[in-house]
Structure formats: structure tokens, C-alpha cells
Amino acid sequence: MNPDEKVFKIISVDGGGIKGLYSASILKRLEAKFNCLTSDHFDMICGTSTGGLIALAIASKIPADKICKFYEEKGELIFPKHPVRNFPFIGKIDIGFLKQIAKGGKYKQEGLKKSLIEIFGDRKIGDSNNLLCIPSYSVTEAKPKVFKYDHLEGDLSRDNGALMYDIALATSAAPTYFPMAELEYYHNEQFIDGGVWANNPTLVGLLEALNNFVGTNKSYNKISILSLSSLSITGGNPVGLKNERSFKDWGSDLFETSMNGQSYFTDFFLKKITEISDINIDYIRIPSVSISKDQESLIQLDVANKEAYDLMKIKAEEQSLVYEKDEKINKLFTTKKTYTIKHG
């Protein structure tokens, strides 16, 4: 190791609804292997949507094992199963889908909010153990918003007083799934899921690092990034699908297609920039594993049941067995973070 190297370490977690259990299960395995808390090994934590929830939990020094239990214990409260009813002249329709297209969202916010309050309590962004980047989108201001720990390097003073559960609501308010998050702390500004523009928030973290912490006349001269994918359907579709598609035809694919495309491009960009840039960057992404056609119905943003949980945990273990042997992963989890958060 170069003694003159000062490495700024970032972990980034994709969005994906209940599929956050896959990402959290990978972290659980890594924490067990290296006998550590993820929070102690990364200077900055980035996360969008369900990845934002994971990021805030990591920054609160909550073990990944407890984050996994959160998904399994609260998943059906957050994403309750709706009945299917038979309508004259129309046929069978899932009531949740009917709410999604005609009545303000598939799910109420109460189950999610109650669950978030249980895990975060009255913790605020200013209580974080790590620097933070949590993407959302402000409908009020019609532009992206990134919630951050108010660090001195950026002369920030906006977010430290915000409650973590409010920020988790703001980053995960997926359009048509949940109501917008209206936050009193931000003068009732309304937010939706950060996945509409940064489902993979790795670039958000990279930009924040280069602006404030890494480079000429800054404290660090190298960046190491671990990016965690959600579990996604990777098999594609046959040609010959119906061209003229309504919201009913698209269903959950409408949101997932956007998120998957954005996540793919961010990963592609990071791989290329490490090849052509003078910036010293180590980058590794733990991707989704392959999902069979038979398994696709279980791998959705909001399918919350034991069968889905078991499949996600199996897939996470498969991927962990491969990546826990990687030299970059080993280095990330055997060296401590060096940026010190100054509370108060």
C-alpha cells in the first residue's frame, strides 16, 4: 500500500422496494465474515429509495442483520396484499392496481411511516456516524434534491435537523405506489422517490466526494467505491410484444424499466471513468444475479411474503460467496473509515 495514499471510501445502495432485502442480506454476510459494522468502514453512505433506508440505518450503526429483520417483519405492513375482485364486463382486477391507476396510490403511507419510526426513532441526520447522500425529487421545486450530512467542507447547514424517518419517506415515495412525502421541516415541501433520477446513487456520491473531499488541495487523493445493486429481472423479453401499451399494460414495468436503465448507465459510466480518468478510483459493483422466468413474479418492488424473502436471501448468499473473496471487498471491510464526523 502506498503510504501517501489517502482513500475516501463510499458505499452506495440502489433502490428497489422490498428487494432491499437482497442488498441488506449481502451486507449481513459481509459483516459476519469480517466481524464488523459497515458504518465503521465507509466515509460516505449513499442510498436511494429502499437503498436510502439502508443507508440511513448503516449511518445509525444498525447492524445489517437487524436491517434484514426489518424487511421480513415489516414488509407485509408496508406492502399489504390487496384482494382481487370480479367486476362485471371487466373481469378480475387487483384492487391495489385499481388504486394505483385511479385513487392516489397503491399503498397508504401509514404502514411505511410507522415502520420507519420504529427503526429510526427520533434520530436526525445530524446524528449520523457517516457522511450521507440520499437522493429524492422535490415536486415543489421541480428538481432533484440530495439530503446530506451538513459537512464543514461544503459549508452546509440545511439537513442536520431533519428526522431520519422523514428523509427515508422522501426518498422512497414511489409515484403511484405511495403518496408524496410532505415534510414539515422543509416548510411542507413535497418529495417523491429519488429513483426517478438516481436509482443507483453512485454518481451522486462520486460528485460529492470530488467537490469536497478528494483531489488537489483536498484531504484525500483516492476514492474506493462499493456499489450494491438491488435484485432485478435481467432476462429481457421476446420480440413481438404489444406496441400500444397503456398504464395497465405496463404495470410495475413502467417504474422498474426506468430504474433499471438508470442503474445500468451509472454502472457503465463508473466502469468507463475508471479506465479513462486521471482520478484514482477503485470501483466494484455487486450486481443482481440471474432470475428465472418462474421466479420473476416474486421479484417485484412490492411482493412481500416468505417465499419472496427466502428467494432473495438465497440469491444474496449466492452472490456473497463470489464477492466476499474479492480483494477490493476485503480491503474495504478490513480498513476503517478515516473521515471523522463532528457532532454538536
Image: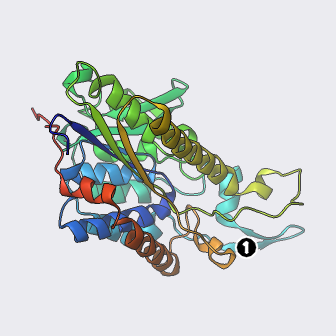
Closest to the observer, 180 or 287: 287
**Residue under the point 21% across and 47% down:** 122
- The answer to whether residue 203 is left or right of residue 54 is right
Q: Position of residue 19 (x, y in %)?
A: 49, 63
Q: Position of residue 202 (x, y in %)?
A: 43, 41
The amino acid pointed to by label 1 is Arg
Q: Is residue 31 above or below residue 336?
A: below
Which of the two residues, 279 or 129, is positioned nearer the viewer here? 279
**Image quadrant occupied by the C terminus:** top left
Can residue 193 be seen? no
Query: Residue 201 placed where, x, y %?
Result: 45, 42
Callout 1 secondary element: strand
Query: In which quadrant of the rendered view does residue 281 lie?
Result: top left
Front residue of 253/268: it is 268
Q: Residue at x 43, y 71 (%)?
A: 316
Question: Which residue lies at the image location 41% right of the left edge and 75% below the top edge?
Answer: 317
> Which residue is pictured at 25% across the width and 65% down the height?
31
Residue annotated with mark 1: 85
Question: Is residue 29 found left or right of 297 in the rendered image?
Answer: left
Number of numbered discs:
1
Q: Is residue 87 visible?
A: yes
Front residue of this view, candidates 5 and 74: 5
Give the side of residue 176 with respect to residue 162, left or right: right
Q: Is residue 102 left or right of residue 22?
A: right
In the figure, 200 relative to 205: above or below?
Answer: below
Give the class, few, some or many, for how many residues have Cα within 10 Å of label 1's Cα (few <14, many ≥20).
few
- Name above or below for residue 211 compared with residue 44: above
Q: How is the image coloured?
A: rainbow
| Residue 302 drawn at (x, y percent) | 55, 64
